[in-house]
Image (spheres, rainbow, N blue to C red):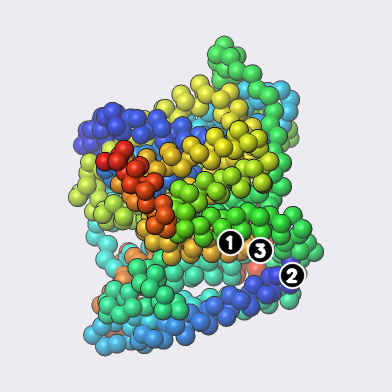
C-alpha cells in the first residue's frame, strides 16, 4: 500500500493546487471595507491541504503511517473484482436512469445485483426487483410528491397510466 | 428549575402525539435494525433516510431521526454479541466481552445486560441534558461571530487532538470538506465560486447529503463488502421472559459500576465534537476494567464489559446533541447530518432555537425520554426477530442500501449531476478509507463550512483584518487557545516520545 499512499498523496496535491488556482478567480487578499475576498477562504484551505499532502508523502517515505508499512496491495484480486462488479453495477444503474427512468433502472439493477452477484433464486430476485420500484413509486410520487426522472419518451404511456392511479 | 420541568412535560406530551409516537416507534425499530446490520450505523441510517422526512413537519422529522439514532445505539450490541462483529463502530467495545459471553452460551445474558445498561445510560444522559441545555443556550445567546468561529475551530481541533487518526490526513479531510462547502456562490460578493469545469451543476453548491450519502451509503458499503468478504455467521440465542428477567437481575448486579461509569463518562465524551459514541464506549470499557476488582475477567466474558460501553454509547449519543442544539455545532457525524437537516427544514441551529422555537426544542428533548423507553421495550421483545433478520444474505441488504442511496441522493436536490457526484464521492471515500483517511471530519466540515466562513469574514471585518480579535475577547479568547493547544497536542506528543528515544507509536487503537 506504500505506493498507493504515495500516488494518492500526489493526486490530492494536484487537486489542492487546482483548488488554489481556481480560488484565485476571486479576490484572495483583504478588501478594505469588505473583509477578506471571496477566494481567500478556499485558497488558504487548499494551501493547508497541499501542505498536508506533503507531510503524508514524507510519512510514506519514512514509513511512519500504517498504510505505508503494509505490504498488501491497495486492491487485491477480490477488491478489484468487487469494485468492478459492484461499483460498475451502481454506475450502470445511474447511467440507465435517464433512459429507463429511476424505477426501470432500479428494477434492472436489482435483477443484476440479486441474480448475478447474489445468486439468489429467480423467485426471490423477481419478488424484490418488482416490489421495490412499485413501493418507491407510490412513496415518492404519491405520498411525498417528489417526481423522479421518467426516462425516455417511450415510457410516457406507462407513467401516464400510473399517474391516473395516484392523482 | 420548575420552568424546565414544565417545558419538559410539554415536550414529552408533544412526543406522545399520535404522529410523533408512531414515528418514534418506527424510528426506534428501524434504528435497531440499522445499528444491528454490520456496515450500517446511525450515521448511515440518518444520512440515507433524511431525504424521506420532508413529508412530515420539522419537529416530527427530527424526532424520527433522533429515534433512529437512539435505536441504532441499542442495535449495535445485537450483532456485536451474536455475530461477533460490531453492528456499528459505536459497539466495537461491546464485542470484547459480549462475544465471549455468547460463545459460552450466555448470549441472552449479554443481550439483556446491554439493553438495560443502554437504557440507564440514556436516562442519565437525558437528565444531564435537560439540566445543561437551557443553561448553555442562555450563555451562547451572547455569542458574536468571533465566538462562533472560535467554537468551529475548537470542533475541528478536537478531531486533530483527540481523534486518534493520522494528523495530516485528518486536517486534509477537514479542509476538503470546508472547500466543498465553499462551492457555489460567494455569499458576500455574489460571484460564482469554484465552478469546476464550468459545469452548471456546481452552481447550486455541493449539498452535504450528496457527500454524506456518498461516504456513508456507497463508500462504506463497498468497504464492508471488501473487508468482510461477504462472510458473516451468527450464534443461536434462545429467549424466554423468565430467563430474561433472571439475566437482567444477575447482569445488573454484576455490572452496576460499569453502567454508572459508562453513563457519565459517555455523556461528557459525547459532547466533544470529534469524540462521540465510539471513543466514549471504548473509554468507558477501559475505565471500568481499570477500576474493576477483577480486571483479569475482562475480555473473557464479564457482563460489566458489555454494560460499560453500551451505557456509554447511548449516553454519548444524547451528549452529542447538546452542542448541536445549544451552540449549533454537532457533537458527532450523525448530529452533523441532523444539523444539516435542520437548515433544510428552514431552522437556524444555535442558541436562538430555545427562545424562537421552544416547541421544536422541547419536543425533541421530550422525545429522547420516550424513544429511550421504547428502544428498550422494542429491543427486548424483538431480539429473536433481529437475529433472524441478521441472517439475511448481505447481497440483499447491500442492494437495498445502494438503491436507497441513489434515490436519496436524487431526492435531496433533484439533479442527476448530484447523483453522479455522489457515486464519485463514494468511490473516492472507499479508497481514502482503505488508506486510513478519516472521513467523518469532511462530513462535519461540509455542514459547518457555511457557518465557519461567514463568521470568520465578519470577525475579520470587525477587527479590520486583525486576527488577534479571536484571542482578546473574553469568551472567544480561551476557546481559541484551547483549540490551538488541541491542534498542537499530537505534535507535542511526538516530540516528547522522540526525546525519550522511542519511536512514535500509533495509538489509534484507543480512540479510533
Q: Nearer the viewer, mark 1 or mark 2?
A: 1
- Tell me which residue sits at (64%, 49%) in the image: B224
Query: Is residue B285 among the parts visible in the rendering?
Result: no
Instruction: From the top left corner, tell me how far across and down residue B1 is, in percent.
Output: 24, 37
Tell me the quarter of the picture where residue B84 sits. top right
Identify residue for label 3: B435
- For the C terminus of chain A, the quadrant is top left
Tell me the quarter of the picture where residue B21 sits. top left
Question: Are marks 1 and 2 in one subunit?
Answer: no
Task: Chain letter for mark 1, please.
Answer: B
In this rendering, would B431 be left or right of B200? right
Task: Chain letter for mark 2, please.
Answer: A
- For the N terminus of chain A, the quadrant is bottom right
Mark sitting on residue B479: none
User: Element type at marker 1?
Assistant: helix
Q: In front: A28, or B204?
A: B204
Identify residue for label 1: B427
Q: Against B331, is B264 above or below? A: above
User: Element type at marker 3?
Assistant: loop
Identify residue for label 2: A2
Instruction: From the top left corner, tell me how far across and down residue B203 is, in percent.
Output: 35, 72
Circle 2 packing at 10 Å, graded few (<14), some (14-19), many (20+), is many
Instruction: From the top left corner, tell me how far across and down residue A39 is, in percent.
Output: 38, 81
Question: Are marks 1 and 3 in one subunit?
Answer: yes
User: Element type at marker 2?
Assistant: helix
Amino acid at each position: 500500500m506504500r505506493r498507493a499512499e504515495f500516488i494518492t498523496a500526489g493526486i490530492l496535491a494536484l487537486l489542492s493546487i487546482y483548488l488554489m488556482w481556481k480560488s484565485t478567480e476571486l479576490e484572495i487578499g483583504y478588501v478594505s471595507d469588505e473583509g477578506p475576498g471571496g477566494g481567500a477562504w478556499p485558497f488558504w484551505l487548499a494551501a493547508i491541504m497541499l501542505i498536508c499532502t506533503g507531510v503524508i508523502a514524507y510519512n510514506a517515505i519514512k514509513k511512519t503511517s500504517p498504510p505505508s508499512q503494509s505490504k498488501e496491495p491497495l486492491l487485491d484480486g477480490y477488491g478489484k473484482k468487487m469494485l468492478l462488479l459492484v461499483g460498475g453495477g451502481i454506475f450502470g444503474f445511474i447511467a440507465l436512469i435517464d433512459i429507463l427512468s429511476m424505477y426501470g433502472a432500479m428494477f434492472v439493477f436489482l435483477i443484476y445485483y440479486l441474480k448475478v452477484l447474489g445468486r439468489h433464486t429467480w423467485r426471490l430476485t423477481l419478488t424484490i426487483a418488482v416490489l421495490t420500484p412499485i413501493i418507491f413509486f407510490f412513496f415518492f410520487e404519491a405520498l411525498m410528491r417528489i417526481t423522479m426522472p421518467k426516462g425516455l419518451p417511450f415510457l410516457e404511456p406507462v407513467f401516464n397510466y400510473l399517474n391516473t392511479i395516484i392523482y | 428549575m420548575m420552568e424546565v420541568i414544565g417545558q419538559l412535560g410539554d415536550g414529552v406530551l408533544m412526543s406522545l402525539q399520535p404522529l410523533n409516537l408512531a414515528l418514534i416507534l418506527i424510528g426506534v425499530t428501524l434504528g435497531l435494525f440499522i445499528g444491528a446490520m454490520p456496515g450500517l450505523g446511525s450515521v448511515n441510517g440518518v444520512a440515507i433516510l433524511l431525504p424521506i422526512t420532508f413529508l412530515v413537519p420539522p419537529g416530527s422529522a427530527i424526532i424520527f431521526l433522533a429515534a433512529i439514532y437512539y435505536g441504532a445505539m441499542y442495535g449495535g450490541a445485537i450483532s456485536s454479541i451474536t455475530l461477533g462483529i460490531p453492528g456499528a463502530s459505536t459497539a466495537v467495545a461491546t464485542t470484547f466481552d459480549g462475544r465471549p459471553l455468547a460463545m459460552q452460551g450466555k448470549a441472552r445474558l449479554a443481550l439483556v445486560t446491554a439493553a438495560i445498561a443502554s437504557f440507564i445510560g440514556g436516562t442519565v444522559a437525558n437528565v444531564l441534558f435537560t439540566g445543561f441545555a437551557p443553561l448553555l443556550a442562555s450563555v451562547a445567546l451572547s455569542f458574536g461571530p468571533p465566538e462562533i468561529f472560535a467554537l468551529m475551530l475548537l470542533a475541528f481541533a478536537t478531531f486533530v487532538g483527540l481523534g486518534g487518526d493520522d494528523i495530516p490526513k485528518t486536517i486534509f479531510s477537514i479542509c476538503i470538506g470546508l472547500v466543498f462547502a465553499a462551492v457555489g456562490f460567494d455569499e458576500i460578493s455574489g460571484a460564482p465560486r469554484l465552478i469546476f469545469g464550468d459545469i452548471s451543476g456546481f452552481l447550486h453548491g455541493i449539498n452535504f447529503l450528496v457527500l454524506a450519502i456518498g461516504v456513508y451509503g456507497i463508500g462504506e458499503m463497498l468497504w464492508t463488502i471488501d473487508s468482510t468478504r461477504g462472510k458473516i455467521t451468527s450464534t443461536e440465542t434462545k429467549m424466554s421472559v423468565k430467563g430474561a428477567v433472571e439475566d437482567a437481575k444477575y447482569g445488573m448486579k454484576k455490572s452496576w459500576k460499569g453502567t454508572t461509569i459508562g453513563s457519565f463518562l459517555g455523556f461528557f465524551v459525547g459532547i466533544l465534537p470529534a469524540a462521540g459514541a465510539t471513543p466514549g464506549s471504548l473509554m468507558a470499557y477501559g475505565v471500568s476494567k481499570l477500576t474493576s476488582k477483577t480486571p483479569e475477567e475482562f475480555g473473557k466474558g464479564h457482563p460489566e464489559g458489555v454494560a460499560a460501553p453500551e451505557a456509554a454509547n447511548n449516553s454519548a449519543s444524547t451528549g452529542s446533541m447538546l452542542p448541536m442544539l445549544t451552540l449549533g455545532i454537532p457533537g458527532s457525524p450523525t448530529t452533523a447530518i441532523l444539523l444539516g437537516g435542520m437548515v433544510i427544514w428552514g431552522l437556524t441551529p444555535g442558541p436562538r432555537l430555545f427562545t424562537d422555537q421552544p416547541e421544536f426544542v422541547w419536543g425533541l428533548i421530550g422525545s429522547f425520554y420516550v424513544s429511550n423507553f421504547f428502544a428498550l421495550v422494542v429491543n427486548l421483545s424483538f431480539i429473536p426477530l433481529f437475529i433472524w433478520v441478521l441472517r439475511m444474505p448481505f447481497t440483499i441488504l447491500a442492494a437495498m442500501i445502494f438503491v436507497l442511496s441513489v434515490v436519496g441522493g436524487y431526492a435531496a436536490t433533484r439533479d442527476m449531476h448530484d447523483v453522479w457526484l455522489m457515486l464519485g464521492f463514494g468511490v473516492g471515500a472507499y479508497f481514502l478509507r482503505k488508506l486510513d483517511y478519516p472521513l467523518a471530519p469532511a462530513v462535519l466540515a461540509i455542514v459547518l463550512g457555511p457557518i465557519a466562513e461567514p463568521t470568520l469574514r465578519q470577525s475579520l471585518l470587525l477587527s479590520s483584518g486583525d486576527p488577534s480579535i479571536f484571542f482578546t475577547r473574553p469568551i472567544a479568547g480561551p476557546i481559541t487557545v484551547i483549540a490551538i493547544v488541541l491542534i498542537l497536542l499530537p505534535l507535542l506528543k511526538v516530540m516528547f516520545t522522540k526525546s525519550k528515544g522511542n519511536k512514535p507509536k500509533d495509538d489509534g487503537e484507543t480512540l479510533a
